[in-house]
Amino acid sequence: MVDKFDWPVRVYYEDTDSGGVVYHSNYLNFMERARTEWLRSLGFEQNELMGQHHCIFAVHSLNMNFKRPARFNDALLVQSEILKVAGASIQFDQKVLRDGELLCKAEVKVACLNSNGFRPMSIPSFMITRMQGEC
């Protein structure tokens, strides 16, 4: 449906543990930023989606595997690729790379929710159209 979306990330001191290695939960932050920037690249600001369409996205589930550590000051690349769009969810394959080497990967399912009641809602058709236009 959509080509890969790449987002560069620099590892800051605050992202690491006392040994200078990226703390495991910060990979989730890097991936969240990449998904946000992917939406922005399609012309969607999350605050506008919520305010005008009552649409928010929340992580439903994820499966994550760690391969190699990232360290302080590393330049990383987060790759995001859509595996599936189905009604009220988007399934992503996300990878964190350093110089082409896989450090971490995750399959992330994101649910589209109505911001008023936090109940699942269909992804708005105008968003689906824009996602398909990026093929």
Image: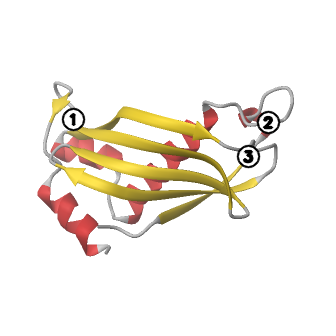
Whether residue 14 sits left or right of residue 82 in the image: it is right
Rendering coords of residue 19 (x, y %): 87, 30
> Could you say where residue 21 lies in the image, as x and y percent from the top left?
79, 36
Q: Are marks 3 and 1 in contact (CB under 8 Å)?
A: no
Q: Secondary structure at mark 3?
A: loop
Relative depth, front residue between 129 and 95: 95
Q: Nearer the viewer, residue 11 or 91?
A: 91
Circle 3 packing at 10 Å, graded few (<14), some (14-19), many (20+), is some
Using the image, determine if residue 34 lies above or below residue 111: below
Q: Where is residue 20 shown, x and y percent of the image?
A: 84, 35
Q: Which mark is residue 11?
A: 3
In the visual, does 105 lie left or right of 123?
Answer: right
Mark 1 touches mark 2? (CB < 8 Å): no
Indicate which disc residue 73 carries.
none
Numbered mark located on residue 21 in the image: 2
C-alpha gap between disc 2 and disc 3: 9 Å
- Identified by mark 2, the residue type is Val
For the point 19% across and 46% down, the residue is 52
Label 1 vs 2, first from the N-terminus: 2
| Residue, disc 1 | 113
Q: Residue at x 21, y 59 (%)?
A: 127
| Disc 1 secondary structure class | strand
If the image is split into quadrants, where does the N terminus sit?
bottom left
